[in-house]
Image: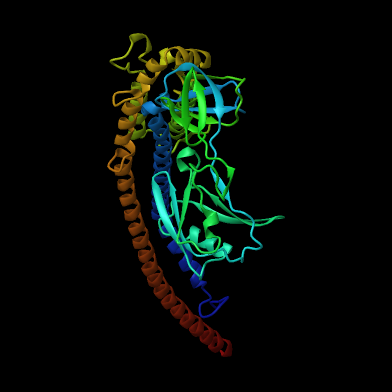
Amino acid sequence: MAGISSAGLGSGLDINSLVSQLVQAERAPASGRLTTRETRVSSKLSAYGTLKSTIAEFQESLKKLKKIETFQNRSAKVSDESLLKATGGTTATPGSYRVIVESLAQTQKLASDAYATSSTVVGTGQLQFSANGKSFNVDITAANNTLAGIRDAINGASGNPGIKASIVNATTGSHLVITAAGSGTAEGMTIAVSGATGSLGDLAYNPSAGSNPMTVKVAATDARIDLDGFKITSSTNVFSNAIDGVTLTAAKVDLATPVDITVANDSSASKTAVDQFVSSYNKLQTKLNEMTAYNATTKSAGQLQGDSLTSRLASQLRNELNTALSGVDADLDTLTELGITSAAKTGTLSVNSSKLDTLVSERFEDVAALFTGDNGLAARMNKMLDAFSGSDGSIAARTKSLQGEQKSLTTQREALDLRMTQLEARYMKQFTALDTMMSSLASTSAFLSQQLAYL
């Protein structure tokens, strides 16, 4: 009689492998369904995140187009920037001007006579500084009566509006140099000395006096220009109010060379803003096309193919682009009339640069009206997009729903894992019992075979 053989412990059954295969067979269908759903949800969440980010980038370009300032930039060109520089602001009026730079602003510098060294004792008393309607006093005592001490006392004095003292060590000796707080004649200093001992009185300066112990190294002067025959002065080399909306900066005096200034509309900034609008729109449209496409050859679909939200977004984008703006000239109330057209197949925009350049140059205000303001194209499109990408928009609602589904799938996955763990334990118990029984039968078979052999 043939015995029951075993390749392993007990009955010889490979219980671990057998149980693992049975559990895997039980798990596979449910796990596969969960994996498919998890992949779909994760893919859609990623797609909506990308879509929202792309919409936000497009809305940034709309913000620039909505602002009237984008179309109010002015350029100011000068014939010789070595003599004069000019910058146009948004309030500047286009026009031409001629300027002659007659003088530059200077900051006054006064210097004392020479002293042996910076530690030389000068004297005591009080220095009274006055300039541009401001004054302050500096007390000089035995504690600070050296040239260096006086310098430090001036620089640290309470109420000092910015007058600076320094020491220059020349071949003749050490000189105290005092520099005014700012340029221009109004900042010219007066230094009075009272209660002086020693040579402290030699630091006095009175611009009205015929002579002074302090020497003028640099005179306090205003900048002066001749603007179309008008004399204009400034305490600095910058003239911010000579021409409304234009800032002039004098750089060099040349009485024989007039500088011609031309203020004009600066179309470069507005054209850049329009180009960014087109580029960002095309990026959004291309992303929509990719997400909703279906490739019949590969039988693969985009992440949001057949999605109603993206279909609605694409439709509303086209409507806004093709809607004529009310309240503006009828011949320039759409993007098409501006030279911006959309491709029938892809929906992306293209720009007729020569037409756009001409309209921006010749009809600057009309172009601005098409985009700017609360009823302009930029504001309309931005409002429409907010309904999709805003915190309470459609994308946020759809994302929240998908996140809820994702959480539910995680719970289902955990429940499946628990069920499979329990199933594995039950199978293991059953097959272990089977193994024990088969081991017992194998022992009985061996015994019977032995007894029969004796007969």
Horizontal and vertical percent for residue 97? 50, 18
How many labels, in total? 0
Which of the pair 387/239 is nearer the observer? Answer: 239
Percent across and percent down for residue 102 are 56, 26
Tell which of 154 and 62 is nearer to you.
154
Q: Is residue 280 visible?
A: no
Outermost residue toward the right in this view: 171
User: With 117 as the anchor, is 207 left or right in this view?
Assistant: left
Query: Quick one: 5 or 179, which is closer to the camera?
Result: 179
> Can residue 69 be seen here?
yes
Q: Quadrant of residue 82?
A: top right
Q: Residue at the spot x=56%, y=26% of the render?
A: 101
In this view of the protein, which residue sits in the foreground, 240 or 402? Answer: 240
Q: State the residue at coordinates (45%, 40%).
A: 186
**Residue 139 as seen in the image, left or right of residue 2:** left
User: Which of the 4 quarters of the picture holds residue 85?
Assistant: top right
For the C terminus, the quadrant is bottom right
Q: Position of residue 127 (x, y in %)?
A: 46, 57
Say if 83 sits above or below 353 in the image.
below
